[in-house]
Amino acid sequence: MESQTVASLIRSLIRQFSATRGGVPTVLTKLYRSCHDGGSQPSVESLQTTLLRILETFDDVYIVLDALDECAERKDVLKWVKQTTLWRKSKLHFLATSRLEEDIAMHLRLLDPNHIVIKQDLVSRDIERYIDSILDGENSFRQWGDEIKANIKNTVLKSAGGMYARFYCNKNDKLTVICSRFRLVSLQIDKLQGCLSLGSLEDQLENLPHNLDGVYDRIISGIDKAYHADALKILQWLSFSVRPLKLAEVAQVVGVAPDTNQGLCFKPSQIFADPRSVLMICSSLVTETNGE
């Protein structure tokens, strides 16, 4: 959530919802001018007002927040969640993830007393089934015997045990707090698939990150330094694209380079000969679905 503040959260939502309209909304232009054409920073209140006016132009609004518990301004973010969920209940659909923290759970329960709780053991059983399906079905794990597979399963389950262990959802689908342990487990399993020896496997198991930040840090640090700039371009284009990009299109992104005269230029010699190189460079960060 950028710098994990209310202001950065609202700015991010304004940027994302504005992008889907294919231009700069009039209300956002007015906010810019009211701040001396960017000479000063808008208040949180003016950002929120601008956001709500932009959201008014949509028939339905879907907002997804990740890791509420990691916000630097947790109380303010929870207050923002409460205020925002009171806006246009008929069109707002709100989804958020968090660790099981009592202050967060208390605020969310107050928003809707008719919430449904799915306990950790139910989620854990689904995760166990997921891990079993990967260990038994992926070629990269067939080299390991049952004892080693059991150790992989137990270690991954233990590592992910504290991640977002409970669900809250109201009956009208307006507010939900979900479990993100699946994502953590998926990333950990992806990392283990690359182990070619028992020693490297044991080392990875011994040093598994216990949260998503740790996993992503390890993934990014593992990108070949020669391709850091390419990986950054790819992730930037995917993050701000107004539609899903095809793999062949993403492979062209690395050919876009800064130019002192034109601002940007396209260098065909820089693009990947094989579009699937994108998946190799950005392993676990980028996935392909039906060619996109």
Image (cartoon, rainbow, N blue to C red):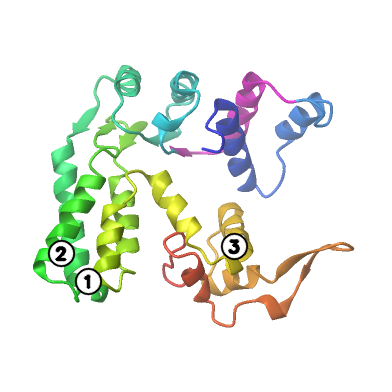
- Check whether the beta carbons of the residues at disc 3 and disc 1 lie within 8 A of each other: no
Crowdedness of circle 1 by 10 Å Cα count: few (<14), some, many (20+)?
Answer: some
259 in the magenta segment: no
44 in the magenta segment: yes
At a point 60% along the width and 78% down the height, the residue shown is 272
- Check whether the beta carbons of the residues at disc 2 and disc 1 lie within 8 A of each other: yes
On the image, the x and y values in percent for residue 228 come to 59, 62
Magenta region: 41-64
Which residue is situated farthest in the bottom direction here? 273
Question: Mark 1: which secondary structure?
Answer: helix
* Residue 56 appears in view: no
The residue that label 2 is drawn on is 149
Question: Mark 3: which secondary structure?
Answer: helix
Residue 74 vs 92, above or below: the answer is: above
The residue that label 1 is drawn on is 141
At a point 50% along the width and 19% down the height, the residue shown is 76
The residue that label 3 is drawn on is 228
Identify the amino acid type marked 2: Lys
On the image, the x and y values in percent for residue 97 come to 36, 36
